[in-house]
Image (spheres, rainbow, N blue to C red):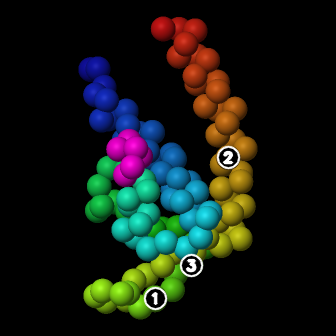
Amino acid sequence: MTPTAESVLTQLRKGTVDYCVLACLRSGPAYGLEIAERLGEGKVLFASGGTLYPLLSRLRQQGWVTTTLEPSPVGPPRRYYHLTDEGKAALQVFTRTWHPFAADVTTMIKENS
């Protein structure tokens, strides 16, 4: 059975989207909708809003992010996500690993297409 583009994207997201969220928080705290918008800009990294909050909860349980509740200019308080030192370290390891991995994948695809 030939995979669909969506099934390939799903598999690629599973290994990378956590780290993309950490990268979104590298420049400072953000609330869920801000993170979703950043991830959704490319239309490839982010599948649906229903997957973001469980992911953020998992990152919090891992100690990679912390949260604070802050007043919102409209509506209820917003939960802001902050990158922890452990999250920064995880992102650094991923970044060091990702670059050679992506380069090798790109080489293989170019050479074998």
Q: Is residue 57 visible?
A: no
The location of residue 48, given as percent across then percent down, is 29, 55
- Residue under the image location 55 percent in, 73 percent down: 29
Amino acid type at mark 2:
Thr
Q: Is residue 86 something that shows in the picture?
A: yes
Q: Residues within 10 Å of mark 3 (few under 14, many from 20)?
A: some
Q: 107 above or below 84?
A: above
**SS of the residue at dot 2?**
helix
Q: Which residues are magenta?
A: 40-45
Mark in front: 1 vs 3: 1
**Residue 42 located within the stretch drawn in magenta:** yes
How far separated are the C-alphas under marks 2 and 3? 21 Å
Disc 1 marks which amino acid?
Answer: Leu
Q: Position of residue 13 (x, y in %)?
A: 43, 45
SS class, disc 3: strand
Residue 3 on image: x %, y %: 30, 25
Tag count: 3
**As rendered, which of 15 and 107 lies closer to the eye?**
107
Q: Nearer the viewer, residue 74 or 23?
A: 74
Residue tagged by mark 2? 95
Q: Earlier in the sequence, mark 2 or mark 3?
A: 3
Drawn side of residue 30 relative to residue 87, left or right: left
Relative horizontal placement of residue 86, taking residue 2 as reference (left or right): right
Q: Which residue is mark 3?
A: 66
Query: Relative to residue 97, is residue 27 depicted above or below?
Result: below
Separation of disc 2 and disc 1 at Cα? 29 Å
